[in-house]
Image (tube, rainbow, N blue to C red):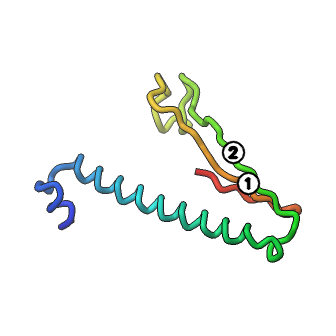
Amino acid sequence: MDQIGRVCNREDDAMCRRFLLLQSFTTSRFICSLSCWLVILTTASDRRAIGADLTLASFRVDVTPPIGDGPCVGCMPKVGSIEHPLEMRGIVLRSGDDSYVIAA
């Protein structure tokens, strides 16, 4: 709370608090994503340790809900217009019969 008060100069400024929470969440998400990529790249570079049948594929999908559809089974209002399309990106790792998907 002390950091929020120093940055915002007012403790009752809700918008400033939301901004700081969003900023810390974005930083945490970036660090987590970077860590995942480092693990994947270091593992994928050593083919002998994980097997020769490892395949890697990337994907990019538009997951924007259609206009008029409710995204959360009635929890949220129906989509009236699209301001910012939603996109999911990720990778698929396959090794033998096992498949792993990492998406954001």
Which structural element holds mark 1?
strand
Which structural element holds mark 2?
strand
Counting residues from the start of the chain, the first of labels 2 and 1 encountered is 2
* Residue 54 picture location, percent across and down: 82, 63
Residue at point 15%, 52% (across, down): 12
Please give the count of numbered marks on the rendered protein.
2
Residue at point 81%, 58% (across, down): 55
Circle 2/circle 1 CB separation < 8 Å: yes
Residue at point 63%, 52% (across, down): 103
Please state which of residues 64 and 91 is positioned toward the viewer in this rendering: 91
- Residue at the spot of label 2: 59
Quadrant showing the N terminus: bottom left
* Residue 2 picture location, percent across and down: 18, 67
Residue at point 36%, 60% (across, down): 24
Residue furthest toward the bottom? 49
Q: What residue type is labelled 1?
A: Val
* Residue 96 picture location, percent across and down: 88, 63
- Residue at the spot of label 1: 92
Residue 12 falls left or right of residue 87: left
